[in-house]
Amino acid sequence: MYTSKKIIDNLKVPFFINESTNKNPKRMKIYRLAIILIVLFITTQAFAQTNVEELVKIGIQYHDNGDFDKAIETYKKALETNPKSSLVNYEIALTYFTKGDNEKAIEHSDIVINQKGDNLLAAYITKGSALDLLGETKKSIKLFEKAIKKIGGHYLLYYNLALNHYKLNDLDKAEENVIKAIENNSNHGSSHLMLANIHDQKRNKIQTLLATHYFLFLEPNSKRSVQAYEMLMKNFGGDVAKDDNKPNTINILLSANNDDQFGAAELMISMLEASKSLEENKGKTEDEMFLKNTESFFKILGELKEIKNKEIWWTFYTSFFYDLAKSKHLETYCNYITQSGNDNSKKWLTDNENRLVDFDEWLKSN
């Protein structure tokens, strides 16, 4: 924004006034009056803008404290000063959405969207989410697709688009879009968790394990981590059955849902589970077996990786975990990702803070 000084300095005057000669006093007064009016206008506008920004800060504070009615009341005062403000309209839309008034959320989101300026991405996401909650999930999908075409493939647009397809049980479309979200931002934990859930429903163990591992790496200690930890352990167990009549016989069952590229890896998972009963592993704790089998899982996947394969399972997940398995930090990693469901892991992390620091340094250098 220009300050009043800059505007005055750049003001184009249609005639030259030489104050020392005082040749045109009438025009001089008009000119001075024009400058005064400009200064007053700029000052008023600056004050109004400051007032709006202060009201928004207050409104956000009310919102964050859960007092949505007072937040809305504050935003309305700001709109009296600037009804078209994209910032205020977005903030009030978000508060209406959080409060559950989805129609109002859409109304104010549309004002932002129609301006095609600031807060456009956030307005699209708010409107799309509101449409979904109103039962208009297909309209929400069309809106997110339109937003991607207009403003580009932001990871949150792809994620929300995937979420809508997931709700409609279109798992293939959900997977397609959530992978695009990960490709745009690999640090978005929710996208990895959704991908894990998609393949857990499809009963694809290897894909579920890879995506769950990475989610827990990003978010190891939250409410969602507990569910992810359980999903990880369920899939890492493998399909192994013992015959009580034949104690030395173990039956390994393979999923019919997995594709050829992961068949060998799934067989290996079941063999790792079966190996727990081997003589060499007797006396080892569950935590020790998890570390040992995780190392084997990551290394075998790394050896199975084909350079020509460009899918995310190989280029992103396997590449990272293979490097990790070859490093000295795998024990730290295993305790780090299992802390939400394993008290032993929590204690290990507390007792080995220096190894966490080393792990962090390794991550930064890779």
Image: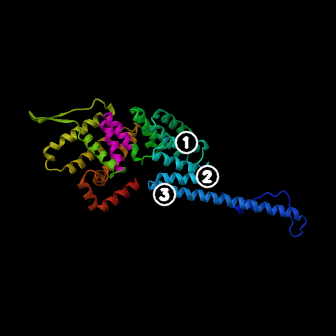
Q: Residue at x 16, y 47 (%)?
A: 281
Task: Please state which amino acid type lies under the numbered disc 2.
Answer: Glu
Mark 2 and mark 3 lie on one chain; the one further toward the N terminus is 3
Q: Where is residue 3 in the image (x, y as percent from the top left)?
A: 68, 61
- Residue 50 placement, left or right of 67: right
- Residue 173 placement, left or right of 262: right
Few, some or many residues within 10 Å of mark 3 (<14, 14–19, 20+): some
Few, some or many residues within 10 Å of mark 2 (<14, 14–19, 20+): few
- Asked if one can make out residue 124 in the rendered structure from this viewpoint, the answer is no
Task: Please state which amino acid type lies under the numbered disc 3.
Answer: Gln
Looking at the image, is 142 positioned above or below residue 79?
above
Mark carried by residue 61: 3
* C-alpha distance separating marks 1 and 3: 23 Å
Q: Which residue is drawn at 48% across and 57% down?
A: 61
Number of on-image labels: 3
Quadrant occupied by the N terminus: bottom right
- Residue 146 placement, left or right of 330: right
Q: Which residue is drawn at 50% across and 44% down?
A: 126
Looking at the image, is 211 positioned above or below residue 222?
above
Mark 1 and mark 3 lie on one chain; the one further toward the N terminus is 3
* C-alpha distance separating marks 2 and 3: 20 Å
Magenta residue span: 192-217
